[in-house]
């Protein structure tokens, strides 16, 4: 059953001695918190200015974003650091096509990132790239199931703020990493409302995220790259046994 806005607020004020800490703590912690962001059954989350992109996905000489200047006329030239790179793109567009296997992602490997901070005046994101960002808000959740999604207005601007990773866990503590994609070149701003967090009750014995040895992201701060995805040979063994 999903918590209402007033119930979210009540859970934030209700100390639970069974939660971590010498004297316990509430089931929901959101920092920073402002009641103006509390909705009927969710709380609005905001975009942190720190971004990352995987270095291997950005063509050499191409910019990961364009600083936004209201009123300026933009063209493809603005995606390139100088005229030489732009001319190379004109002559050899296949080198810059994101479908080129040269920009391969291997989920089982660690990845080097390009880190940048978007300016207060805004940044234009490129539909070719996937961006790692994060929420401004740090949250802790106990005895409840937290999950995030995009706000309706974010969706109607064709901004995707997460790829399958919008579900949290009982015991998760940290900021939320966002996997952002845009359908069109789109301006985003630091501290804009980027999503909402919801809370559900659940049944059954607890298996807390912060006590699970296979948890990768507890305590994360800022946009966090993907941990290497395991290839579980024991699953292959189980499949072979079932034949």
Image (cartoon, grey):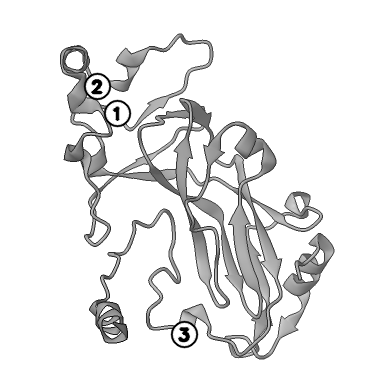
The residue beneath circle 3 is: 211
- Evaluate whether residue 223 shows in this view: yes
The residue beneath circle 2 is: 81
Say which residue appears at 23% left-offset and 26% top-offset: 96
| Residue 110 placement (x, y as % from top left) | 23, 59
> Any mark on residue 63, and which?
1
Marks 2 and 3 sit apart, C-alpha to C-alpha, by 46 Å
- Asked if marks 2 and 1 touch (Cβ < 8 Å), the reply is yes
Q: Secondary structure at mark 2?
A: loop
Q: Secondary structure at mark 1?
A: loop
| Residue 71 placement (x, y as % from top left) | 53, 10
- Of residues 154 and 237, which is closer to you in this image? 237
Q: Earlier in the sequence, mark 2 or mark 3?
A: 2
Looking at the image, is 95 positioned above or below residue 54? above
Marks 3 and 1 sit apart, C-alpha to C-alpha, by 40 Å
Foreground disc of the pair 2, 3 = 3
**How many neighbours does mark 1 have within 10 angstroms: few (below 14), some (14-19), or many (20 or more)?**
some
Single out the residue that lies furthest toward the front: 243
Quarter of the image for the N terminus: give it: bottom right
Say which residue appears at 26% left-offset and 20% top-offset: 80
| Residue 232 placement (x, y as % from top left) | 27, 75
Q: Secondary structure at mark 3?
A: helix
101 horizontally vs 18: left or right: left
- Evaluate whether residue 61 shows in this view: no
- Of residues 151 and 174, which is closer to you in this image? 151
Looking at the image, is 8 positioned above or below residue 142? above
Q: To which quarter of the image does residue 12 belong? A: bottom right
Q: Earlier in the sequence, mark 3 or mark 1?
A: 1
**How many neighbours does mark 3 have within 10 angstroms: few (below 14), some (14-19), or many (20 or more)?**
few
**How many neighbours does mark 2 have within 10 angstroms: few (below 14), some (14-19), or many (20 or more)?**
few
Q: To which quarter of the image does residue 158 belong? A: top right
| Residue 122 placement (x, y as % from top left) | 50, 29
């Amino acid at each position: 059953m999903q918590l209402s806005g007033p119930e979210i607020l009540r859970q934030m004020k209700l100390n639970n001695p069974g939660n971590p800490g010498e004297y316990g703590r509430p089931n929901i912690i959101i920092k920073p918190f402002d009641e103006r962001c509390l909705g009927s059954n969710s709380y609005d989350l905001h975009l942190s200015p720190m971004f990352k992109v995987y270095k291997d996905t950005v063509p050499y000489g191409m910019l990961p974003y364009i600083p936004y200047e209201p009123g300026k006329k933009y063209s493809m030239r603005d995606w390139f650091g100088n005229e030489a790179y732009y001319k190379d793109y004109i002559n050899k567009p296949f080198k810059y096509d994101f479908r080129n296997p040269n920009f391969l992602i291997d989920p089982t490997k660690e990845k080097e990132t390009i880190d940048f901070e978007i300016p207060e005046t805004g940044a234009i994101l490129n539909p070719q790239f996937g961006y790692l960002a994060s929420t401004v808000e740090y949250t802790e959740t106990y005895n409840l199931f937290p999950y995030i999604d995009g706000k309706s207005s974010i969706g109607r601007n064709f901004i995707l703020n997460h790829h399958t990773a919008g579900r949290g866990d009982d015991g998760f503590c940290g900021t939320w990493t966002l996997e952002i994609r845009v359908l069109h070149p789109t301006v985003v701003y630091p501290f804009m409302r980027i999503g909402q967090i919801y809370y559900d009750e659940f049944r059954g014995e607890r298996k807390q995220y912060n006590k699970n040895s296979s948890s990768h992201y507890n305590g994360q701060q800022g946009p966090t790259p993907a941990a290497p995805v395991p290839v579980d040979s024991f699953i292959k063994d189980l499949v072979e046994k079932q034949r």
